[in-house]
């Protein structure tokens, strides 16, 4: 028999003096999560400007930060947290994994110094709900000790085979769960996939049409390596009321490939992606803001069925209650985009 918390206790603070866990996630636009290396002073000095261009600034402490720069990177987070006004832009960190010798200091020192500024902690290499429970408890203790006024949320990276197996339990582990990002690079390594890329497709992963007599060339199509796992993540997140994201796309010289990968994730239900390079900011904003033509159609659908029930015909297309709900997802997202992004607001005509 599996033992779980009583529903009544699920929303209680885990430490005396910790803030009340949230029942609903804050409504925020998070199309683009810009990664910033915590040890690179030059890049850190650009954070005030970056914060005006992106939806989330994430200071990275984990992979890509050398072992001998972990302490400097942690100080980088603290400086940025103390000195930057983020406005409506999110301030996140990616801490080191719980199995590393750095994670404890990351959490203890950063919550002590800037816990009231920090919105979300991205936790890498989450294998199961036990990782979330540990971080949940520790954050409650730190929040109580340092008088943090609102709960710091947890965002898991789905990047191990074990994590994919346990994705539903991870999504439902705590009211602190904000969402999840799909991490194709670590996941590939964890699964023993025979690739060396950070996200995107692979030319070897194809289906080939049957040979036809008299035809030399057989039609081949590249397939989506990530479809199954992203779909599984989106279902786990949607079912638990938390947010799914696509993670990194490593080939900066291939904006078209990046856009295609982001768009597949968007159409499958993801709300944003990581940007590892300034050139990916606009790609993410474009992809994760709904298409103005689709929004225009969605508005017509809603106008045609004001109470969201029944059946209507718009531009020759049949609509019913379910199409109305799809249209509402699109228009609600467009409204959120319009609030933050005046350039796009004019395209939506809301
Ligand atoms: C991200 O961290 C990844 O491993 O893809
Ligand atoms: Mg990773």
Image (tube, rainbow, N blue to C red):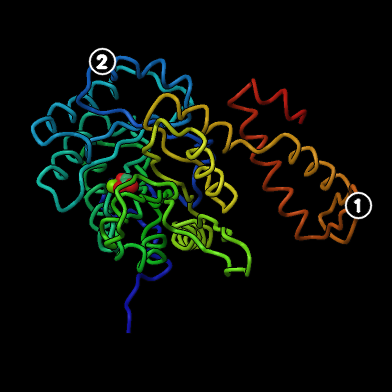
Report whether residue 123 is seen.
no
Ligand 1 within 8 Å of the CB at mark 2: no
Q: Is residue 92 left or right of residue 210?
A: left
The residue sitting at 34% across, 73% down in the picture is 4
Q: Which of the numbered marks, if any, corresponds to residue 171? A: none
Ligand 1 within 8 Å of the CB at mark 1: no
User: Which residue is identified by label 2?
Assistant: 42
The residue sitting at 16% across, 34% down in the picture is 109
Residue closer to the observer: 246 or 189: 189
The number of numbered discs placed on residues in the rendered structure image is 2
Instruction: Using the numbered discs, state the Cα–Cα distance from disc 1 to disc 2 in whole angstroms.
Output: 55 Å
Pointers 1 and 2 in contact (C-beta within 8 Å): no
User: Which residue is identified by label 1?
Assistant: 316
Q: Nearer the viewer, mark 1 or mark 2?
A: 1
For the N terminus, the quadrant is bottom left
The residue sitting at 38% across, 71% down in the picture is 6
Report helix, strand or loop for mark 1.
loop
Report helix, strand or loop for mark 2.
helix
Query: In which quadrant of the rendered view does residue 74 lie?
Result: top left
Residue closer to the observer: 115 or 210: 210
Query: In which quadrant of the rendered view does residue 276 lie?
Result: top left
Q: Is residue 23 above or below residue 106?
A: below
Residue closer to the observer: 316 or 221: 221
Residue closer to the observer: 120 or 219: 219
User: Residue 225: horizontal and vertical position, in percent?
Assistant: 44, 57
User: Residue 44: horizontal and vertical position, in percent?
Assistant: 28, 19
User: Residue 298: horizontal and vertical position, in percent?
Assistant: 77, 44
Q: Is residue 83 left or right of residue 179?
A: left
The residue sitting at 26% across, 42% down in the picture is 143
């Amino acid at each position: 028999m599996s033992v779980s918390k009583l529903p009544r206790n699920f929303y209680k603070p885990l430490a005396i003096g910790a803030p009340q866990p949230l029942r609903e996630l804050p409504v925020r636009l998070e199309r683009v999560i810009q990664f910033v290396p915590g040890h690179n002073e030059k890049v850190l000095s650009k954070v005030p400007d970056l914060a005006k261009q992106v939806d989330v600034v994430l200071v990275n402490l984990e992979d890509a930060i050398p072992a001998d720069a972990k302490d400097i990177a942690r100080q980088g987070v603290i400086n940025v947290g103390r000195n930057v006004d983020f406005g409506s832009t999110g301030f996140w960190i990616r801490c080191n994994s719980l199995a590393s010798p750095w994670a404890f200091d990351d959490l203890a020192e950063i919550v002590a110094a800037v816990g009231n500024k920090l919105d979300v902690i991205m936790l890498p290499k989450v294998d199961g709900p036990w990782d979330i429970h540990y971080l949940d408890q520790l954050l409650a203790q730190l929040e109580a000790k340092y008088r943090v006024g609102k709960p710091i949320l947890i965002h898991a990276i789905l990047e191990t085979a074990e994590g994919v197996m346990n994705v539903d339990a991870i999504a439902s582990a705590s009211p602190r769960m904000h969402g999840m990002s799909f991490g194709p690079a670590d996941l590939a390594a964890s699964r023993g996939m025979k690739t060396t890329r950070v996200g995107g497709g692979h030319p070897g992963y194809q289906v080939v049409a049957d040979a036809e007599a008299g035809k030399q060339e057989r039609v081949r199509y590249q397939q989506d390596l990530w479809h199954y796992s992203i779909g599984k993540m989106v279902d786990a997140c949607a079912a638990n009321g938390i947010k799914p994201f696509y993670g990194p796309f490593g080939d900066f010289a291939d904006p078209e490939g990046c856009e295609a990968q982001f768009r597949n994730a968007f159409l499958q239900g993801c709300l944003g992606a990581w940007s590892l390079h300034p050139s990916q900011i606009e790609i993410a904003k474009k992809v994760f803001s709904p298409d103005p033509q689709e929004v225009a159609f969605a508005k017509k659908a809603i106008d045609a069925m004001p109470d969201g029930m029944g059946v209507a015909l718009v531009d020759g297309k049949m609509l019913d209650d379910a199409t109305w709900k799809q249209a509402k997802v699109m228009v609600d997202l467009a409204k959120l985009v319009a609030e933050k992004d005046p350039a796009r607001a004019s395209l939506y005509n809301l």
